[in-house]
Image (cartoon, helix red, strand yellow):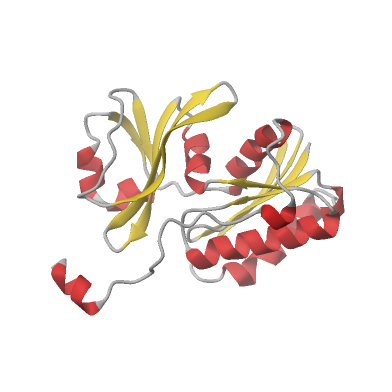
């Protein structure tokens, strides 16, 4: 199966082409330059594989949660490629991609959501697939879901940047992987499993995963947190 995947939910802009067991990747720290960098990166990875978009079996994207602009860019570009090629789309939650990257059986994944909050989810590996223990959620220090005890690996910028998150789950998380962001290679691998299970969508049904409807605090809210 050939899958072209993109992940732009954070400051990392990532593209991957999975063909059987072969994986080609292009990555760059983009900050706010995803729209500028993503299409050239897609062209380069296709050229490296001597492939065309029309030759893909499916397209995949990290659907968030994460940067509003980033996940909209990923969704829109993948939908355009899929419409043009007449192929399906596989949306993959960005927190699930983090879990895949952890190389562990029980993973608590968290991304910094700014404004003192984090995006959080927990997954357990079942064979090639994952069972969702905590669905992707927007959390802060006052609202944290319980986690079954023992044997969890923590990963993601949420743990890197928020002491309250590390402290809240210190009794459950035995290992922590620092400095990781969601990557297109993990999105592609997960998408291959999902597509084989019949979980691909028509392009028009693909959508970002938003967990928040505001992107900044008011002056009053900022002062209240001081």
**What residue sits 86% from the left and 53% below the top?**
54
Residue lying furthest bottom: 219
- Across and down, in percent, residue 4 comes to 72, 49
Counting from the top left corner in percent of width and height, residue 202 is at 74, 50
Q: Is residue 147 above or below residue 39?
A: above
Left or right of 87: which side holds 177?
Answer: left
Q: How many marks?
A: 0
Position of residue 78 relative to residue 153, above or below, is: below
Please say whether residue 67 is visible from this viewpoint.
yes
Q: Is residue 168 left or right of residue 98?
A: left
**Residue 208: percent from left, percent from top:** 56, 57
Q: Nearer the viewer, residue 79 or 50?
A: 79
Residue 136 falls in which quadrant of the image?
top left
- 5 displayed left or right of 28: right
Q: Position of residue 217 (x, y in %)?
A: 29, 72
Say which quadrant the C terminus sits in. Answer: bottom left
* Residue closest to the eye, 103 or 142: 142
Depth check: give the residue in front, 102 or 117: 117
Please tell me in which quadrant of the rendered image residue 108 appears.
top left
Q: Residue at x 45, y 24 (%)?
A: 105
Q: Quadrant of the N terminus?
A: top right
The residue depicted at 44 percent of the width and 46 percent of the height is: 180
Q: Is residue 30 visible?
A: no
Q: Residue at x 16, y 73 (%)?
A: 223
Question: Which of the 4 image quarters holds residue 197?
Answer: top right
């Amino acid at each position: 199966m050939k899958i072209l995947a993109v992940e732009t939910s954070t400051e990392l802009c990532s593209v991957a082409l999975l063909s059987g067991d072969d994986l080609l990747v292009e990555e760059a720290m983009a900050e706010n330059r995803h729209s500028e960098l993503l299409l050239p990166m897609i062209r380069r990875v296709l050229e490296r594989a001597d492939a065309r978009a029309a030759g893909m079996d499916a397209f995949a994207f990290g659907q968030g949660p994460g940067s509003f602009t980033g996940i909209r860019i990923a969704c829109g570009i993948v939908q355009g490629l899929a419409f043009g090629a007449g192929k399906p789309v596989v949306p993959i939650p960005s927190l699930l991609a983090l879990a895949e990257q952890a190389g562990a059986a029980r993973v608590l994944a968290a991304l910094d959501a700014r404004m003192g909050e984090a995006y959080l989810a927990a997954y357990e590996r079942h064979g090639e697939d994952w069972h969702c223990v905590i669905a992707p959620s927007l959390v802060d220090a006052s609202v944290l879901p319980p986690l079954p005890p023992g044997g969890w690996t923590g990963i993601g910028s949420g743990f890197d940047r928020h002491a309250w998150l590390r402290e809240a789950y210190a009794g459950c998380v035995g290992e922590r992987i620092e400095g990781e962001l969601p990557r297109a290679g993990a999105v592609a691998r997960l998408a291959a499993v999902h597509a084989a299970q019949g979980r691909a969508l028509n392009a028009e049904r693909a959508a970002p995963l938003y967990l928040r409807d505001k992107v900044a605090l008011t002056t009053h809210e900022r002062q209240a947190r001081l």
